Image (spheres, rainbow, N blue to C red):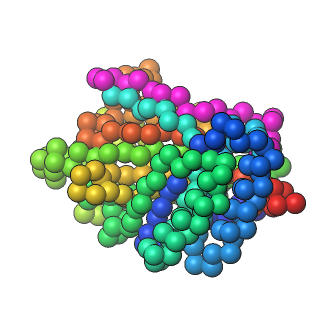
Amino acid sequence: MAVAQPGVFAPTEAHHLALEYTLLTDADADHVQRHIAKLIILLRDQTDIHHVLAFGPALCAMTGVMPASRPFNAFEPIHGLDGTSAPATQHDLLVWIQGPARDHVFDTALAVDASLRAVMACVLEVSGFVRDESRDLTGFIDGTANPTGDLMVETALIPDGQSGEGGAFVLTQKWKHNLDAFNELSVPDQEQVIGRTKDDSIELEGDDMPDNSHVSRTDVAVDGETQRIYRRSFPYGSVAEHGLYFLAFAHDQGRFDLQLRRMYGVTDDGIRDRITDFSAALTGSYFFAPSSDCLDGILA
């Protein structure tokens, strides 16, 4: 039985930092593998830092962490209704770190970057935080319907006995909010956009739930099976730019694609998620977070 990376399910800490890297054009596979091995050791030595390493399709092929028998596709752009879009900025490595102290998280990030600089370039750095009751900057609680317990594990991880067992597919997107526009709405209108009450995060029911709410577009079943994902997103930002770094895990990459296509109105019903009126995706990458056992193989 393969063991997942502990950081996938680690408790949420106050400070987050996501680093996304691309391979340098002249980096050879052996050199890359040696630097990743050093990175694994470095991160495992950090006693109060949770972390996840996840590999894009090109790096999976280079390192062999993704079984050849399991399909894994790069993020493709989605061109939605009314000029909305989800851009593709596929990167090669994700390093997600979180901890209780910002200085230690930052020091760890500096060490991560130094260990990779010879073979990769950091092309996206998002520093985030936890806001009261895990609320997004819109004021709504994020991840209310996240699975817990056994369902959380079943949702996030490839089951035992399948190729890639103990691993998880990962979707990352940096979303930029237009809070001025969103905050112009009354609270009841904001609740219609999200599909939940603002104060206590209770899902709207019946006629009160619009077809184009965020909950309606992302709560979907296929052949009677709810297409759940396990969210670990966090707010980020400055006064000039702020939003949500969307980070989620699933045992099936197709679940992400289905939810995104429904959000942008490119499925058969042609309904677009109203949240895209107030938040725009700036990036989009798919990764694979291999099991800890698989990472041990890089160290061998």
Q: Position of residue 6 (x, y in %)?
A: 66, 66
| Residue 8 located within the stretch drawn in magenta | no
Residue 151 lies in quadrant: bottom right
Task: Give the quadrant of the N terminus.
Answer: bottom right
For the magenta stretch, what is the residue range? Answer: 64-83
Q: 207 or 191: which is nearer to us?
A: 191
Q: Residue at x 48, y 61 (%)?
A: 17
Would residue 162 be seen by someone viewing this image from the given angle? no
Q: Main secondary structure of the magenta part?
A: loop
Q: 236 or 78: which is nearer to us?
A: 236
Task: Give the quadrant of the C terminus.
Answer: bottom right
Q: 228 or 62: which is nearer to us?
A: 62
Q: Residue at x 48, y 39 (%)?
A: 284
| Residue 66 located within the stretch drawn in magenta | yes
Would residue 236 be seen by someone viewing this image from the given angle? yes
Q: Residue at x 73, y 68 (%)?
A: 41
Determine whether 213 is above or below 9 in the image: above
Q: Position of residue 21 (x, y in %)?
A: 57, 47
Residue 129 lies in quadrant: bottom left
**Quick one: which residue is furthest to the right in this view?**
300
Determine whether 133 is above or below 170 in the image: below
